[in-house]
Amino acid sequence: MRELVWKIGGEQGTGLDSTSDVFATVCNRLGYYIYAYKTFSSRIKGGHTNFTVRVSTRRVLATAEGVHVLVAMDQEAIDRLAKELVPGGLLIADSNFQPKAPEGVQMVTVPMTEIARDLLNPVYRNIVAIGASAALLGLPLQAFKDYLAEKFAAKGEQVVQGNWTALERGYSYALEQAADKAFQLDPGDGQRRLIMTGNDAIALGAVAAGCRLVVAYPITPASEILETCARILPKFGGAAVQVEDELAAVATCIGAGFAGARAMTATAGPGISLMQENIGLASMAEIPVVIVDVQRGGPSTGMPTKHEQSDLLALAYGGHGEGPRIVLAPGTAEQAFYDTVLAFNLADNYHCPVIIASDLGLGLWQQTVDNLDFDQVVIDRGPLVDPKELEAMGRDVFQRYAFTESGVSPRSLPGMKYGQYLATGVEHATDGKVKEDPVNRTRMMQKRLKKIKKLEIGGQPVPGILYEGPERPEILLISYGSTFGVVAEAAELLREQGHRVATLQVRVIRPLPVEELRAAIAAAEKTFVVENNATGQLAFIMRAEGVEHPVESILKYDGTLFRPNEVVAAVLESYKGVPA
Amino acid sequence: MASLAEFKTAEKSWWCPGCGDFGVLAALQKALVELGIEPENVVIVAGIGCSGRIGNYIYSYNFHTTHGRTMPVALGVKLANRNLTVIAAGGDGDGYAIGMGHFLHAIRRNPDITYIVMDNHIYGLTKGQTSPTSDPGFKTKTTPEGNLERPVRPLQLAIAAGATFVAQGFSSNQKQLVRIFKEAIAHKGFALVNTISPCVTFNRVNTYDFYREVLVDLDNDPNYDPTDRVAAMQKLMETDELVTGIIYREPESIPFEEKLPGFRPEPIVSQDWNLPREEFERLLARFR
């Protein structure tokens, strides 16, 4: 088999997250492509939680359609999740709770708790479950042993041996019970790829891009970015600082940007709402700053642990007044890494806020990344004045907000002699001093807004879209963010049914790549915009920005990501009654 | 060394004639000159309000922020470049109303920043509304029957929050104010200087004459020990904060930026940000 889906369910706070992490990491090391995700809620102990790992011989970036092996640690997991099992799927349950399986479900009971108790350590229960899973999925036990040895090396030989014994006993018990029912996954290619979340990728991208200050306020699902940076940045002379609220978080980053450092904050919807006034300040005073929004269900507190893409309008146009801002939308962890590097270069080149529109699906779910190429990381500081030229000018000559053809004016940094200026959120003249007359106001508005009409770095245009498929498709599927992976897979499924399908990922939300979108939609017979929100925000932005061609929205806003088949069904539904 | 003239700008002042902020500006410029700090190494982070205009009149790097956000912006400047002299300046509304949250957390954090609050007990720029330091019963446009709330006591709050330097100046006592500013700027850590800066247009109660009469000058008390936190609190309660001088200072204060793990003496802005390839690969190894 080319692909298998493994799922484990039980009570929150019982170590299932690290169990899932072990399983996903080992499969990744075997050379499979992984997509791993969970269902969780805003509580620490208690309540149901479950983790799903898609293990495939090709790249997968979407929620699974069905489960092959389900590990249930309590009856609730069976009651909730058994219906997801594919025909022939296997339920592995801890015999401890006397599991009852629904009719027609093949169950293998394994005395997980008993074995763990026997080994005098209750946490081994989850390792027994992994051993049993490896047996029934046809995965080599040695890879798990190697990983556990490495993971627990620091805890000593005894802990490693204990884990191994638990693993082996689970493995052999499951084989004894159900060797005939076991699946056999095609072997992985053995390539040791990366496995990471979008949040991991953004933290790595920031450090690689020269960001040395990450300032944030904890919030689901963005906190991992601050946490990862708190671990990494001190090694490189930087700091991650948890501040009192999101107002302080973005304001601190803006202060650091003014002084010449690369700083970033990361938040979710509620934080974005609080940051809007200061994002406007960075637009107005022309200060580089990078802001990450890992979108979750809104409005208000909404659904903190559930996926949504409903901040798009707030990111592109939020806050009062009209100022420049750039909004990038990575769809994979790999793109998130490179987009973060790009975000810092854009901020330094365009002197404005750059927002990375991530989402919970991208931010939290683990995925396999082929590689991250160090050679593609270039730090481009953008237009800075030469301190020697400044000194030669003498005082009161330098004009920080000079009118230029591109709208971008070279900036000075504190410490440079005769580069002194006033940065202010008030409308100002070219020297930064307050000036509100109509002629100056109009010119300054135009100066700031024209900066981001077209994005370039090092003379190269920044691609606004990623297009894949035939030039004149029957069906065009438009996505952004983590919906990218779903749409790619849905397109495959539609192609298998004989449809001519292309996909278009919008990579930059602002400035929207209007011309590219127009051309692509005009060439397609029918276009669908696939988004996780209720009102079709990307489709709205497209219309507002002048993409006048009709499109159909496929929307989902129940807190979960699309499954590829849902997109396929929605596309086919729209064709009902119309000959394909 | 820079002269006083080098700290001045040609900008014509927007403040009303007689405004207390003139005295604050003059004392700050003088303090900077006497400390031998070069104008390009000074960053003034100002809030919104009449006092927030101060950056227009000093030839330093100036950042006029959003209302209430001087504290985090100043923190960002200091973290980016710890060689700079960072001074936050704003009014009582900016610092103790809309910015109160940041004020207390800045104190807890203790970055090497000087915070000058020009306190006039009134909102001046919006033309006369009650402020968090307004006295009870004080009649303004928004409290025509008199202010119903108790005033904020910023100096006591600061000490309670763990401040390492707390002082109060009076804009017409230049000699003392220059000395306070110099000591505040030299202090290693967060220094609060609440500065009484009368509004001559909208506050006819808390006038220069009023303050000249009631203010207790700690400089006249040779027995006062500003390193005694309990005595400082007691003095503030006794005088209802109508007192000037250095009220409290902690000689062993270590600024926030020096406590950060791995934070280098060399400012972030001057470091080479390119990661060595092997460091990058080491970071990736965790994800394999």
Image (cartoon, rainbow, N blue to C red):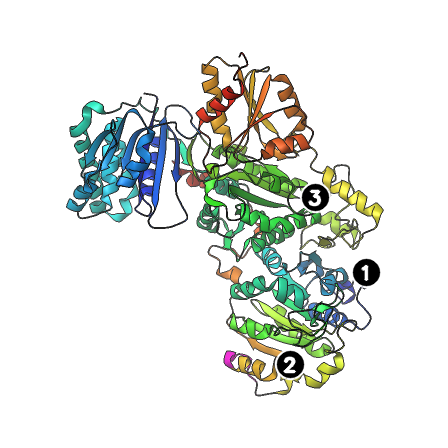
Q: Which chain does the residue under circle 1 lie in?
A: B
- Which of the two discs, 1 and 3, sits closer to the camera? 3
Q: Are marks 1 and 3 in contact (CB under 8 Å)?
A: no
List x then y, in percent, for residue B186.
61, 69
Tell me if A278 is positioned left or right of A488 in this view: right
Q: Amino acid at mark 2?
A: Leu
Q: Can residue B208 be spotted in the picture? A: yes
Q: Is residue B64 above or below residue B273?
A: below
Quadrant for residue B61, please give it.
bottom right
Identified at 50% across, 40% down, the residue is: A202
Labels 2, 3: one chain: no
Q: Is A58 positioned to the left or the right of A413 in the image?
A: left
| Mark 2 and mark 1: Cα distance apart in space | 34 Å
Q: Mark number for residue A386?
A: none
Q: Nearer the viewer, mark 2 or mark 1?
A: 2
Foreground: A337 or A500? Answer: A500
The residue sitting at 34% across, 21% down in the picture is: A2
Residue interval drawn in magenta: B222-230
Question: Mark number for residue B242?
Answer: 2
Q: Given the image, what chain letter belongs to the residue carrying mark 3? A: A
Q: Are marks 2 and 3 in contact (CB under 8 Å)?
A: no
Residue type, mark 1 in image: Glu
Distance between the Cα atoms at labels 1 and 3?
A: 27 Å
Q: Is residue A450 positioned above or below A248 on the image?
A: above
Q: Which residue corresponds to mark 1?
A: B11
Quadrant holding the N terminus of chain A: top left
Amino acid carrying label 3: it is Gly
| Residue A570 or residue A225, whichever sits in front | A570
Please tell me which residue is depicted at 71% across the width and 81% down the height of the picture.
B211
Report helix, strand or loop for mark 3: loop
Q: Of marks 2 and 1, which one's residue comes earlier in the chain?
A: 1
Q: Quadrant of residue A516?
A: top right
